[in-house]
Amino acid sequence: MSLVTITLISSILLILFPHTSAAYGPLNYACCVKYTRNPLPYGVIKGFMEQKSTEVCRIGAIIFFTKNDKKVCASIKDQWVRTALARLRSKIAKLTEQENKHLTTAELITKNP
């Protein structure tokens, strides 16, 4: 094949497939399309993230990550979701507070040998 033929074929392929994965978000990103009807027990939740309808996905949701490495989609309108988020945020605040106290104590020990 000549260089002209290869260039022509490459150009045609680029024209046919102009979309990149970055234009639509990461390829491994799966959007929530519906909400769970069953509340999750707080003990199985290990984290969460927010899915915004203004970004890649069509609906807003809270995605809970469970200890079994599952993702559960929930509506922020549900009372159990708001309660779980409040408990998680409280836990994060306590951990942050403890870390700050530890850092302050470590600084005092370092500054006053």
Image: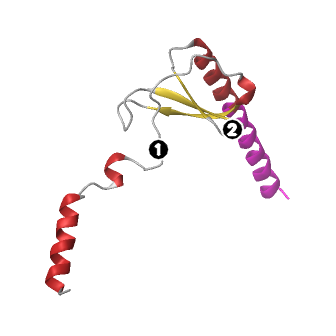
Q: Residue at x 47, y 40 (%)?
A: 30
Residue 64 lies in magenta, yes or no? no
* Disc on the earlier residue, 1 or 2: 1
Circle 2 residue: 96
Q: Position of residue 6 (x, y in %)?
A: 20, 79
Label 1 crowd bin: few (<14), some (14–19), many (20+), radius 10 Å:
few
Q: Position of residue 66 (x, y in %)?
A: 67, 34
Q: Is residue 45 above or below residue 86?
A: below
Circle 1 residue: 29
Q: Position of residue 16 (x, y in %)?
A: 20, 59
Q: Residue at x 51, y 22 (%)?
A: 35
Q: Nearer the viewer, mark 1 or mark 2?
A: 1
- Along the horizontal axis of the image, is 54 left or right of 92? left
Q: Position of residue 110 (x, y in %)?
A: 79, 57
Task: Give the magenta-colored segment's residue range.
Answer: 92-113
Secondary structure under the numbered disc 1 in the rendered image? loop
- Along the horizontal axis of the image, is 68 left or right of 71? right
* Closest to the observer, 74 or 108: 74
- The quadrant holding residue 46 is top right
* Closest to the observer, 99 or 48: 48
Q: Quadrant of the N terminus?
A: bottom left
Q: Residue at x 18, y 78 (%)?
A: 7
What amino acid is found at the position of numbered circle 1 in the picture?
A: Tyr
* Closest to the observer, 62 or 9: 9
What amino acid is found at the position of numbered circle 2 in the picture?
A: Thr
Q: How is the image coloured?
A: secondary structure
Secondary structure under the numbered disc 2 in the rendered image? helix
